[in-house]
Amino acid sequence: MNSIVMTILSLSASGSLLALVLFAGKPFLKNRIPKAFSYYIWLLVLLRLVLPISAPVNLMGSLFVAGQTDVNRIPSVQDDRSPQSETGGADGNAAVKSPATAVPQQPQNLEAAGAKTPVNTRQTPDLWSFIKSSLIWIWLAGSAVSFGWFVTAYLYFVRRIRRSRTAPHGDDLTVFEELIGSSRLSIVCSGGVATPMLVGIFRPVIVLPPLAYVRSGLGGELKDILRHELTHYKRKDVLYKWLAVAVTSLHWFNPLMPFIRKEISAACELSCDEAVIGEISEAERQRYGNTLLAFSAGGRLPAGILTTTLCEEKKQLKERLVGILHYRKITPRAAALALALALLLTGCAGALGVVVTKSAGDTDPQSGLSAEDTAKADGYTLIAAVPLADTEPYEAPEVETAAVDPSDIASVIVSYPCENETEVFFCRAQSGGIFCAYKTADGRVTRFYEAGLYEEGYDIGPFENVFSHDGFYIQSPVGAAYTAIDYYYFEADGTLKLLVRCDNFVIENDMDGDGKKELLWFYHGYPGDVSGARDAFYCYERNGQIYVTAFDDLLMSTFPDIAFPGHYFSSSDDPSVLRFTYHLNGEESDTHEFRLRFTEDSLTVYSKADGNGGAAQSDLRAMNPQDLYTDGKIFEGAPEDFINSFQDTVAALTVPDARKGERATDIRAKNEGWQNSSLFFLNSIPERNIYLYGYNDTAHPDYGLILDIGEEQHIYAFPYLYMTNTTLPPEVSASEDGSEIFVACHTGSGTGVSISDLHVFQVSGSQAVPYHLDIGSMVDSLNDKITMSYDAESKTVTVRADGVQIAADSLVSIGTPDGTDIMPDGFYFGNQIWYTLSGNSVKVSFVPTLYSQAQPGVQCYLEHMPPFEADVGFTYDGNGAVTGFDMGEITSSVS
């Protein structure tokens, strides 16, 4: 289900439970607490209905977690399996399904096969999937209709008043001016109303039934009316009612909402009466009650009209008159009781909580903490966000089917009945072999899967909400230690579709918080075992397209020093988190651990620190980037032989003209037959006729940037390093007038947040003049602006820009050889400097790194601090050519 809809439903449930508590407590508290408390406490219900915040104890979050636990598909390797077993996982939540093995029988038809029947579930056609995917729009439409109905009814009523309004009698107007004394509040008479009322928020008006009150001897009653409506005006009661309508309109599907609106309206009048009679004499109170009786004979307002009236509901009149008769001033005891109840109900509102979906930056439904804060609390720090943008789409093969003669079925091994009266089963054939088929309600049997030669290990069961589909999975052994687990579903017309094909050990869980389950599977081992699993794959869906990516490939591209394979383990406290243990090249056993969590666009990696630093308080000296990159790999220019021949080489190439629909090999396909391509397509801004290519030469990999600009093709070649071997293409943007093109080339580890080179191309006509902002110049500029200091007593690193403190935090040591504290005496830039482009706006972001001369190779990445950033501007000569750059104010990205 859509995550926003799930949040709305949980808010509605929380608000309803709180409202029911108030309804239930009303008879016991009616005369014990101030009427104003009974009125304003409903604001707490309205806030509970709209604010997605929770206390550490979160009832809705707990219910959601209990209903959204991961499901593990684990093929059994024992011979004594029960026909269908389901046991709790290590945490008591995960459902572990083992394959079923039935005793072979020899029936002559399917009905006589005696197949074991697992628990039934829904088999949902695509129409239901479409409805579920449209729930957000259905909710929005319902909210708009509900709120629009109130607005329309109100405007119609106001129009009726305007058509029949008249000026009040002069004596009545004098009483109004003496009592009210407000230039914003006005008064009119109208034959369209039968009882006095206050109408409007921005231009409030008291509307009276047409009568000469003073001349008729009702001057005292007029004062009662005006005092009542003035109290409504001062307390903004009309605004309160509109707020109630807006909030309850968001929950139009909840039948409790009309009762909440009605109760707020009733409590409004009772508290207004209490406020008025508290300021008048006993005799005036009696007259006030008589005034209510006099105007109660009027007709009731049309439904949906949002005003404050003197007396509209005859049924409520008795309660109001009793309240006037037994009025007592508010005692300290009553005020204390109201305060205690307010605190108690506020705590209940927080504890009721709300369902929130989880991603790296969102809050946990139980703890209320963000994923990153939760990891920090456990000693983990976010160290990388590996993008999923380059993952290849997954295309499931078409299901090949064939009709089956039921008499060819010798015995059924295991079966599963679908809700659409279709039965899916594995069976042995009279003619030999094992296959999987389904039988429809009309008796037709269709084969769709051919099994191997293995006699045991088959299973069929349901799945729900995997990529918004409900269906069934089949499990079939394909090797001594390998099992195929395939996910199928039926379309609305009965066509069988393969959703995705997995292997060996599968976990179903909403890993990225989008409200749909994703799939994890492992070729070797199981993450719930003590020895863990290896060779992990992640299957997810975006915009209707399914993608599959290998964990090891993502981590290997980001952390080249890790010795693969590592081992994956389930997290006992959070099913959306995997633990990954590993050792570095040269080590013999796993001594390090990551925590892995998915967001909608990346795999986030958290690492646990081995210790904190320790050194005398001092300013840390800066380190030149060349001291770190001794081989000069990042900072050197292109090889000289390449520069000398590059222009001629490109001139001999045929660069595709994208304006004519011609295409080059996309860089994202670099690992599939890319050796035969002489250039790659990198990026483009088609509407501006800007196309970026990269030259491919095995002798000079990743060198040679080719720019194609103009309404007609114009090619310019520059011998720049444009990327690493991780196929993360450069980013490109352009100024509004097209005179400058900005290209940020990710030349570091390929994460996009490591090392970036920036190129500015000044375009005049069809000419492009380059300016290269090399990383060394940027590092030198940062060293001029940034200073850092370390306090050994508090183990705190303080970062200053131009002498102004912009961040301070305890350092986290990563990569120490034996777990000892780092002794920082210097810092450098260079590991993480990247650019963000938007039109002609360029921002540089960076993270400094601490090092220790006394501990060679030991570094401390301050990645638990938010990155620092600054705007990048450029300087120009008299001819308008770029000659240099400067930086604006350096700030923390989450200041």
Image (cartoon, rainbow, N blue to C red):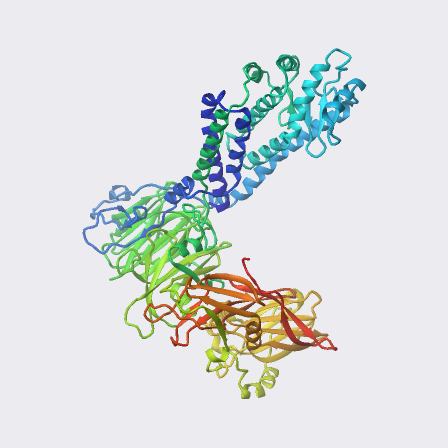
Query: Residue 154's x, y, as percent?
Result: 67, 29
- Would residue 140 appear left or right of 127 to someone viewing this image? right
User: Residue 593 sits in which quadrant?
Assistant: bottom left
Nearer to the camera, 810 or 413: 810
- Would residue 442 appear left or right of 231 to someone viewing this image? left
- Would residue 198 appear left or right of 124 to someone viewing this image? right
User: Residue 158 sits in which quadrant?
Assistant: top right
User: Residue 605 sits in which quadrant?
Assistant: bottom left
Whether residue 363 can be seen here: yes
Q: Compared to 894, does 742 lie above or below?
A: below
**Extreme residue toward the right, this view:** 170
* Mark count: 0
Query: Residue 489's x, y, as percent?
Result: 41, 49
Point out the image quarter for the C terminus: bottom right
Query: Residue 589's x, y, as percent?
Result: 28, 69
- Would residue 879 appear left or right of 274 to someone viewing this image? right
Nearer to the camera, 445 or 501: 501
Query: Residue 171's x, y, as percent?
Result: 79, 18
Instruction: Give me the residue at 23% from left, 54% from top.
Output: 456
**Extreme residue toward the left, this view:** 80
**Extreme residue toward the top, this view:** 217
Nearer to the camera, 682 or 333: 333
Whether residue 399 can be seen here: no
